[in-house]
Image (cartoon, helix red, strand yellow):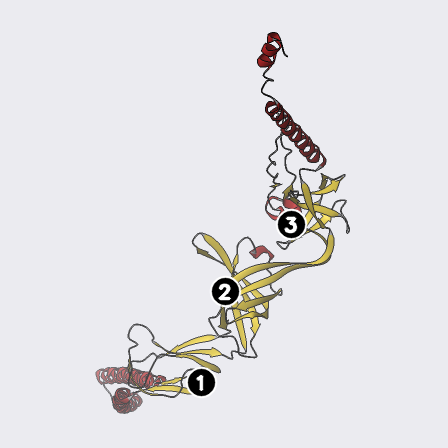
Amino acid sequence: MQTASEQDVRKTLGVGGGRRRWRRWIGAAAVLALASVAAGTALRTRQREPLVRYQTAPVSRETLTITVTATGNLGSLTQVNLGTEISGVVDKVYVDYNAPVTVGQLLATINTDKLKAQAAQAQAALDSVRAKRMQTQATLEEGRTRLERMRRMRDLTPQQDLDTQEATVKRAAADDASAAAQVVQAEATLSAIDTDVRKAEVRSPIKGIVLDRAVDPGQTVAASFQTPTLFTLAEDLARMKLIVDVDEADVGNVKAGQTATFRVDAYPDKRFASRVVEVRNTPKTANGVVTYQAVLAVDNAALSLKPGMTATAEVTVTRIANALVVPNAALRFTPPQAPPADTRGFSLLPRPPVQARYAPDASEAGAHQVWVLRDGQPSPVEVATGPSDGRLTQITGGPLDVGATVVVDTVSPAR
């Protein structure tokens, strides 16, 4: 039997109560031991695994093509807005939309009844002044003859009569000159009316096609203030031009003779070939953006392209064969900063992945540094860069060569 003092000691230590209390102590100790083992394992695993992994890309040699993109509209080589200089009612129209025309072909006629009446009146006035001119010429000839006879008989002719006859001859000459001027004026009036009659016939000045017809028979056209447009004609559409707006930042690279391709919405899967024939110096400003027009020659033998179509062109300004290139991402990459040391011990929760920082693009900031892996860690390499097509950039100087790899991004380790 236990003494009273032993019972007091057990009660004080809390070991009384039999086996149930011992089992609780043993379970708590086991949980603490397992937690310690798990924490130690996690810590050792985190110490072995790298916090950052790197994605690399190879340095290669490729044909680097640099292009300038610009948007514009297709048009015919020559387009003529044909009108009339006279007013009147349209009698007949001889062509319709898309009709082929030749030089001098009659397209429409305007009623000339009034003009013909004016021409007849002008002809009568001309005949009248011509008759008057004949009278003045006869009078002048008669006066000159009489004056000559009086001069031969000077001894028998008073001086006063001789002076009077000379004055009469001068007046007859003046009347004849006035009649001659009236004849010229009447001829000019008749010629102007005849010209208007001829202009009543609207004829094509070029060989081409009718793009637009803005007049119908019976319609009245008025040419009092400006010439109305009756027809829009274009030359043979087998040859066309594409006028694109080139941004001022790119216009220095665009030159006549460069090749280009373009697309139109009507044929989204097809590229059309073209060639730069002109770069215009006149600037265009829209919404604060300055552009310059470049003219591209287009072969449209299939007649699939239409005037006015919107096209997006890519002008090849540089083509470098066998260029040493790296991805642009390699020039933008900067290694991530190391995370701060954890002085409070370890945590069972995973750390968030470290993100790489990116420098500006090489084409924008002129970066000349890439990173390569040495012993698993990124190391900087200075390089000289050349042109870029937006995806790859040429390396013109530095220790890199084909077969090397450069860092382009970071990859979070698998958990």
Q: Amino acid at mark 2?
A: Gly
- Whether residues under marks 2 and 1 lie with C-beta atoms below 8 angstroms apart, the answer is no
Q: Residues within 10 Å of mark 2 (few under 14, many from 20)?
A: many
Kind of element beneath mark 2: strand
Q: Where residue 155 sits: x, y (%)?
A: 27, 88
Q: Amino acid at mark 3?
A: Asn
Which residue corresponds to mark 1?
A: 99
* Mark drawn on residue 328: 3
**Quadrant in which the C terminus appears:** top right
Pointer 3 or 2: first along the chain: 2
Q: Where residue 385 sits: x, y (%)?
A: 68, 48
Residue that appears at 56% across and 55% down: 250
Name the residue furthest top: 5
* Mark drawn on residue 354: none
140 or 9: nearer the viewer: 9
Q: Is residue 206 visible?
A: no
Q: Where residue 230 sits: x, y (%)?
A: 36, 79
- Please say if 286 is above or below 371: below
Residue that appears at 67% across and 39% down: 52
